[in-house]
Amino acid sequence: MFVQMWMTKDVITAPPEMPILEARDMMKQSMVRRLPALSKKGKLVGLITQGDIQEAGPSGATSLSIWELNYLLARITVEEIMTPVDNLITVSPDETIEQAALLMRRHKVGGLPVLEKGKLVGIITESDIFGVLVEVMGIGRDGTRLTVELEDRPGALAEALDVIKSYEVNVLSVVTCDKCPHEEDHVLVVIRVDHYDWRPIVKDLKGKGIKVLDART
């Protein structure tokens, strides 16, 4: 899967000279948490987030009145508090979705502008990554979810799938995780199939020496 398949293409943006109170209202109305800032020529110059705006405000211990606060905030522009483009982490539309997720986690950011030949063509956020997880895990589809523990060796997964294949069921998704809490040389595998009567499958898996940790519809 690639970023261009999951990114938001109709990106809501703000000019760098926009007051941050207007940017805040735009985020609320559009239900977004970040706005790329574009120059008059349409070039990405930065990114402002809800967190940036919150940090720009005075502390809760201030003695200023609400009118004084709004007056001061109204004079601050997006450009003054945004993260400039040179400090932004960006991706291209043909980047893999897992690389985008890794960048977000590594740099502790909730969204990445998507650039193609220097032009903003989209934005990919943590919500989009959650959407990918839901799709990959087959969540929301009818069927059975099996969690098995397999040896970390070639052919182990194929053996488990051969058992499932014998029931002529459709495998909807297979997700592996190498962080097995029980054995260091084992992996966890979540298999979702379009079949409700999981008991015979589980019995045969166990008969092959495969540890089934969970089965549910």
Image (cartoon, rainbow, N blue to C red):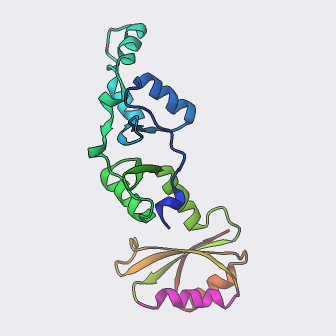
Question: What residue is drawn where x is 39% and y is 74%?
Answer: 178
Describe residue 169's horizontal placement relative to residue 3 as left or right. Answer: right
Magenta stretch holds residue 35: no
Give the x, y percent position of residue 196: 72, 74
Residue 83, above or below 216: above
- Which quarter of the figure has residue 145? bottom right
Rendered-image quadrant of the C terminus: bottom right
Determine the main secondary structure of the stretch shown in magenta: helix
Residue 36, above or below 173: above
Residue 191 visible from this viewpoint: no
Question: What residue is drawn where x is 69% and y is 84%?
Answer: 200
| Residue span colored magenta | 154-168
Give the x, y percent position of residue 49: 40, 36
Give the x, y percent position of residue 172: 63, 74
Residue 211, above or below 89: below
Residue toward you, 154 or 69: 69
Residue 215 visible from this viewpoint: yes
Extreme-front residue of the structure = 41
Residue toward you, 82 or 153: 82
Give the x, y percent position of residue 6: 53, 57
